[in-house]
């Protein structure tokens, strides 16, 4: 019995030990569960705080994106519907009342008793110089039965004539030229030939100037009318078609387009090629480009963008404007045009201009106006200088610093007019370089504080990136601080694009580029473009060697061979060279796609 009791006790002890071990494991598991629960409870306690922080960060990002999009919309509205001038002018005129704004009541006589008479303007410049116009006298006399004196009835006699001037419009008219060529023959030779003798019949026709287009009734004056209307006055061909129909000639726009392209291909393309050669002989070139739509371009949809490029020689020499049509905006276009050329290239901030590999040594100069423009737009969005100043606007401070640079540079305008380029360079080095270096340091610091992706940050980033190139203008007194020369040069095409909107074929676009080259260069050199084109089309078809560079040089707008009647008076030439025009709204670039570029 004792032995059985001992075994039972051992078993009980073993069982107890097993239970202890099981309880111990349960204890450890409960401890682990406890720790996990504590951890979960701690994380659960922190979750609302983390979630709130995450939501706050997301909300801030959404607000920043909202502000950025609102800014983009406002900038777009300002660019497409706002005033084009970069000056901040209070109460600026609307684009839609430019006719009323251009009217000046002071030029018109006042009638009626309601308006008090103003004192007669004395002296000053006469509005119209009547002595330079054709004079027609319109005589006004008293009728025969009205010459009796109202007091005594005696017949009155004239003692003076009062003269006033008015202007009458004589509409354009077409003249049909009947060319009659005298044909002479030798009676003796012709008689012998008719009698069967071996003698040639001698018949000679009077010489006649060669027409610009053989077999066409279009004269140089008619072609020049079409070229001037389309490329100088920005009239679409269909409007000229209607005008000519009113004048008695039913000439289709297809005919006019053919005249322009044939005149370009046969004659004027030679002059444009020579202009390009003379342009690249200079050491300074301005460049710009804009959009053009070509409907029937091989391998491209009608909605794809094409480009009209402009390369211009500066006004410090003979102004030359050479337009170049190309389907793309690729930097390869500028590389090919400037192949082998070395010198200063003045442009906006389009990046391919700054990475040209044309085989020459190109030194880039960035346009300071483009840098200023981005800050000026932000100031406009803020409501003008006063509101921006009250808000401590960084954009306003940047714009004013750049304005101070232009003001300092204007002090050297007389040196530029006199061609004293080295004096101008030294003056800029003294007065302008410190301002520009200080701005660069200031802009770098402000960029670090600006909100990324917002307009101010982008403006500062653009300024910092291109500022070293803008300072390149200090190295040569001939260089301007801006690219306004090319901007003004591209403007006639942009204005014309508002009216005719597109070119039908690449051939037509190339002809348009060439015609703009001729017309705009003529204007910039003080010529009447219509008379100049007419003169070219009269001269070139009758030249012995129209490809001779010396002959082409004699046809250039600045050549002494250009007749005096083609040249405008100095003041009129200066006004024409400005290429000013009424306010315009630019075409929406979103209407086209960048496919194929």
Image (cartoon, grey):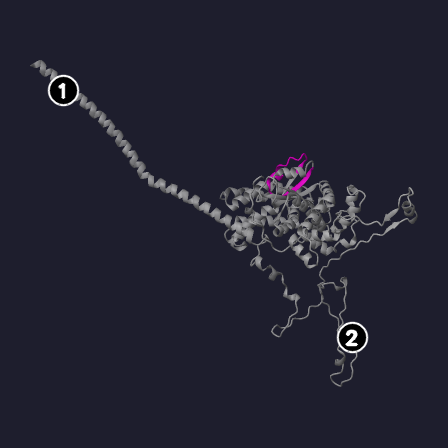
Residue lying furthest front in this view? 195
Q: Is residue 529 among the parts visible in the rendering?
A: no
In this view, the residue in front, 29 or 103, is 103
Q: Is residue 104 above or below residue 564?
A: below
Q: Between marks 1 and 2, how big is the CA–CA gap? A: 157 Å
Q: Which label's residue is closer to the chain start, 1 or 2?
A: 1
SS for dot 2: loop
Within 10 Å of disc 1 (Cα), the crowding (few <14, some 14-19, many 20+) is few
Query: Which quadrant would residue 367 be assigned to in this image?
Result: top right
Q: Residue furthest left?
A: 1
Vertical side of 317 occupied by 360: above or below:
above
Left or right, 74 with respect to 337, comes to left
Disc 1 is placed on an element classified as helix
Judged by depth in the image, the label closer to the viewer, 1 or 2, is 2
Which residue was labeled with disc 2? 160
Q: Residues within 10 Å of mark 2 (few under 14, many from 20)?
A: few
Q: Nearer the viewer, residue 417 or 143?
A: 143
Q: Which mark is residue 111?
A: none
Can you give x and y, in whole percent of width and height, for residue 179 in the image?
80, 53
The image quarter containing residue 62 is top left
* Magenta extent: 341-362
């Amino acid at each position: 019995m004792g032995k059985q009791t001992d075994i039972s006790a051992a078993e009980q002890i073993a069982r107890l030990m097993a239970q202890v071990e099981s309880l111990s494991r349960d204890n450890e598991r409960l401890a682990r569960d406890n720790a996990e629960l504590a951890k979960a409870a701690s994380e659960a306690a922190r979750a609302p705080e983390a979630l709130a922080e995450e939501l706050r960060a997301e909300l801030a990002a959404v607000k920043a994106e909202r502000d950025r999009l609102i800014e983009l919309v406002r900038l777009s509205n300002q660019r497409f519907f706002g005033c084009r001038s970069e000056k901040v002018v209070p109460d600026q005129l609307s684009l839609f009342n430019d006719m009323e704004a251009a009217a000046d009541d002071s030029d018109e006589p006042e009638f009626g008793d309601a308006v008090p008479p103003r004192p007669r303007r004395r002296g000053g410049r006469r509005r119209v110089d009547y002595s330079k116009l054709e004079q027609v006298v319109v005589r006004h006399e008293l009728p025969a039965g009205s010459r009796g004196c109202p007091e005594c009835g005696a017949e009155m006699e004239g003692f003076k004539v009062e003269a006033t001037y008015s202007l009458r419009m004589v509409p354009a008219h077409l003249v049909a030229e009947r060319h009659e060529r005298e044909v002479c023959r030798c009676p003796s030779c012709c008689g012998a030939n008719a009698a069967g003798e071996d003698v040639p019949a001698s018949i000679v026709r009077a010489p006649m100037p060669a027409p610009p287009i053989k077999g066409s009734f279009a004269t140089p004056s008619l072609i020049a009318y079409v070229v001037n209307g389309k490329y100088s006055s920005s009239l679409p061909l269909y409007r000229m078609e209607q005008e000519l129909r009113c004048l008695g000639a039913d000439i289709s726009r297809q005919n006019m387009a053919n005249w322009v392209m044939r005149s370009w291909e046969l004659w004027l393309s030679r002059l444009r090629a020579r202009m390009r050669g003379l342009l690249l002989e200079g050491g300074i070139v301005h460049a710009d480009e804009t959009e053009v739509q070509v409907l029937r371009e091989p391998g491209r949809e009608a909605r794809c963008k094409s480009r009209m490029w402009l390369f211009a020689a500066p006004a410090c020499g003979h102004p030359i404007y050479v337009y170049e049509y190309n389907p793309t905006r690729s930097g390869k276009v500028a590389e090919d045009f400037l192949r082998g050329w070395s010198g200063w290239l003045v442009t906006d901030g389009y990046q391919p201009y700054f990475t040209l590999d044309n085989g020459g040594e190109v030194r880039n100069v960035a346009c300071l106006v483009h840098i200023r423009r981005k800050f000026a737009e932000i100031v406009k969005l803020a409501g003008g200088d006063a509101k921006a100043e009250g808000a401590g606007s960084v954009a306003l401070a940047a714009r004013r610093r750049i304005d101070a640079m232009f003001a300092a540079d204007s002090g050297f305008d007389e040196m530029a007019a006199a061609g004293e380029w080295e004096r101008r360079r030294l003056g800029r080095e003294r007065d302008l370089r410190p301002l520009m270096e200080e701005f660069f340091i200031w802009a770098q610091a402000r960029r670090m504080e600006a909100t990324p992706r917002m307009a101010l940050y982008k403006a500062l980033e653009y300024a910092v990136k291109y500022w070293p190139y803008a300072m390149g203008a200090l190295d040569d007194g001939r260089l301007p601080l801006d690219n306004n020369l090319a901007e003004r040069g591209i403007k006639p095409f942009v204005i014309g694009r508002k009216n005719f909107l597109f070119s039908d074929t690449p051939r037509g676009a190339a002809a348009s580029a060439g015609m703009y080259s001729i017309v705009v260069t003529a204007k910039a050199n003080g010529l009447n473009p219509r008379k100049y084109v007419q003169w070219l089309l009269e001269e070139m078809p009758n030249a012995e060697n129209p490809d001779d560079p010396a002959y082409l040089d004699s046809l250039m707008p600045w050549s002494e061979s250009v007749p005096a009647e083609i040249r405008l008076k100095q003041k009129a030439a200066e006004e024409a060279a400005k290429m000013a025009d009424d306010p315009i709204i630019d075409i929406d670039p979103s209407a086209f796609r960048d496919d194929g570029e």
